[in-house]
Amino acid sequence: MHRMSQSTSTMGTEKIKTSRRKFLKTATLLAGATIGYSWLKSSQVLLFAAEPKDETLPWYGIVIDIQKCIGCGSCAKACKSENDVPKEPFFFRTWIEQYTVKNDGTVDIVSPNGGIDGFEQRVPTEDIFKSYFVPKMCNHCSKSPCTQVCPVGATYESPEGVVLIDEKYCIGCRYCVQACPYGCRFIHPVKKVANKCTLCYHRLKKGLAPACMEVCPTGARMYGNLRDKNSEIVKYLKEHTTQVLRPHLNTGSKLYYNALSGEVR
Amino acid sequence: MEPHYQHLYEILAHSQGYIFPNEIDLQWGILIVVYPFITGLVAGAFILASLERVFKVKILKPTYQIALLTALSFLLVATMPLISHLSQPQRAYEIMITPHSSSAMAIFGFVYLWYLMVVLLLEIWFDYRHSMVVWANEKSGVMKWVYKILTLGVNDISPRTLGWDKKLGYIITVVGIPSAFILHGYVGFIFGSIKANPWWSTPLMPIIFLFSAMVSGISLVLLVYMIISYFRKKAIDLNVLDAIGKYLFFVLILDFTLEGLDQIQRIYEAEESFEIIKLLVSSKLYLTLFFSQGLIGTIIPLITLAFLQFYKHQIRLKKTMYFIIGIMVLIGVYSMRWNVVIGGQLFSKSFSGFTSFKVGLIGLDGTLMAAFWLLLPIGILAFLLWLLPPWKMVNEED
Amino acid sequence: MKFYIPPQITRLALAFAIFISLFLVLRHFLVPKTFGLYGHYRAASLIDNAQLEIHYAGQQACFKCHQDIEDKKAQDVHSEIHCETCHGPGEKHSLNSKKEDILKPSGRAFCGKCHSLNAAKLKSAIFQIDLAKHNIGKNCIECHNPHQPWELKK
């Protein structure tokens, strides 16, 4: 008798437990589905995005001819005016270095105010073995280390191969500044986000040349579409011996120097 | 002139050789020295706690809860130096919602959350749950509700459920060991993976960071144990000190070997960046590397610890010696972080020059801020020891 | 079939489920709309970067009004040099034609930026003059028309 009443009471609680379990199951499924859907929807673009292989867009590259650079500083000056960079000597999207290899083998490198005010010869001519100017700017790498390390996606390679910064998204962690082997990034003192040469993207989109190339008096700086076999830049690359800086770091740099000498870093 | 520019003109005047025009100001300052120091303490303290739990080193039992609570205090503060160093701190949440999978820094948010919630908080919860249920019953008023909430309403203290506390706590500790390695190892990877900087770029960097972290965490627990015993007016168990000292000794040897190996390899290979690095070490980092990190932080503690290991029973000033060793090791590990972070930015990527670094006192990136983030965990630890006193826990052997 | 789930696990699973759901919902609202369209970045940033203000107009804009100078310049050695190299950003001036919005530089230091003697400049790249010896004290443009430098004024 006791056993029978026990079994009925346990059967009763079992029934209640099963229906509660069923309810919890359905509720969790519904909640999970809603959340899962909303998450999937927002990250849909992340899950299914692909790099655009839009062949109709240009793929920009840059050439700098060291033999033509005369260190006038027009490029660096124009860049600051065009791109709202403070005039103080601590922030440069582009700058020029003067290398003086002396007869005793030592190398003297200077870049007073980035070369904006031009250069004066500091070493007497008789002590000079050779001397030249090297303009520097963002290399717009195709395997850009700065893009690789940005933790939030505030710097990126545009579909045209220009490395750009999203000023509204950058958190200012400075990882990109550390990762660039060419020293071309800095933190804008007013905007307080990362900043660097954009190849004057806003000008490229309107068919204008980047400011530095617009004003270079000797044509030492060139830019163009690497995909176009007939472009000036591709023809130049075919006819000259060019190098990139820090090739062993495999950054995919698209800034090719003509007549780059071994002392340059 | 803006004070910021004035500061930069001064640095420019003190720069030597040729540096790239954008390299005048250091990007990562004292707060980025403090951050790996803090996460290192967390990882190290946790590993010591795991020794008791997973590897059954019974002699360390009095330090188990202390190590966990110390780790928690420092972990709670760990994000703050990072956030206060960002130039757009209000956007810090972006790391959580759009983490860039190719960036080591991006995993920080999730590794931190994982470690905080799944490892540390859960392990402490499983360990304290029984006591918290009992305390909830004993106390009244606000504290009653505080403990009730902390138990998450799981009031069952039947032997079966308590057994599950132990089992689950054990699993969490086992999971926690690799998690602690990742929590601090990824910081080493952040530096070690930057191919642009030869002072940082080495596969050994995560491992070096981890071992120096363990050294610092073990020393911290040693010091905390001694200080708590002093304040509670309880005798310090010399066997505990000896046991901690033994682990400190062995890990310090490993740490020294690894860091030495990194330097020896660099000197031997003498590749492109070696000339400037040689100058860096012999001039800019001379004091912090050879004196602070090497002598104070490594050599003297190693010799003293070896001495204490071999002459275990004959020394009267043991407690003082262990205390001083603990402080010296902490100074050494802090110097190591300084040498890596600041040292790596003092020389130019042109390999032809140096900039200089002057730490400001005030401001979000200044010494006072750094000191605040270092001292705040001590306050939190005091609070946690009051809230969850290890010595008032329910003794389950009763 | 019943199997035993300890109460800790059920309670913790619930707590974590709530936390993770909250996070996902928050994330849904916080991620910018165009994020991820072309890669791991906010696609709208391309538009932000493309719509920045232009300050250098390009010399075609100058030639619209200054055809006489265009013709003169084309005949002499400064033919390849664009106007704004010396005159500075010209977009504003090309829109409002105000004199104060364009530079008219002069002085030995200015011309010297290109033409001063420097061992680092290739003679084939630029014609150089020793400013310490050549007509000291005189402004270059007293004799040289900058648009036709070899047409010496006397």
Image: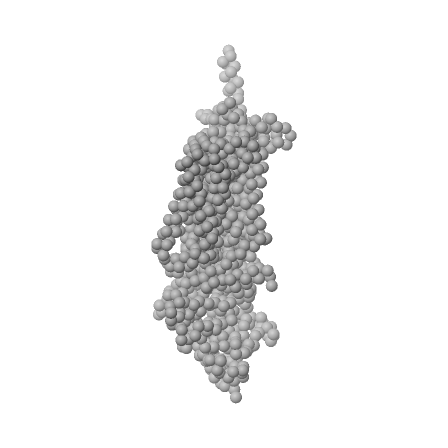
Residue name at image x 35 percent, y 68 percent: A241
What is the tally of numbered marks visible in this picture? Answer: 0
Q: Residue at x 43, y 62 (%)?
A: B352
Picture coordinates of residue A68, whole percent (x, y): 42, 73
- Residue at 52% of width from left, 26% of height from top? B395
Residue nearer the viewer, B195 or A197: B195
Image position, residue C29 (x, y; %): 55, 47
Q: Nearer the viewer, residue A20 or A111?
A: A111
Front-most of residues B242 and A70: B242
Above/below status of B123 relative to B213: above
- The quadrant where residue B374 appears: top right
Asked if residue C114 is positioned above or below residue B351 in the image, the reply reads: below
Q: State whether residue A26 is above or below residue A87.
A: above
Q: Residue furthest right?
A: B141
Q: Residue furthest bottom?
A: C154
Task: Point out residue C12 in the picture as x, y percentages from the top left corner.
Answer: 51, 33
Q: Nearer the viewer, residue B327 or A219?
A: B327
- Describe residue A57's horizontal placement relative to residue B72 as left or right: left
Residue at image location 42% in from the left, 75% down from the top: A125
C40 is higher (above) or lower (below) than C110: above
For the rendered model, the colour scheme is: one colour
Task: Point out the residue furthest to the top here.
Answer: A1
Give residue B367's position: percent from left, percent from top.
56, 51
| Image quadrant containing the N terminus of chain C | top left
Relative side of C50 to A62, left or right = right
Q: Taking the image as drawn, is residue C34 in sight?
A: no
Is residue C136 something that shows in the picture? Answer: yes
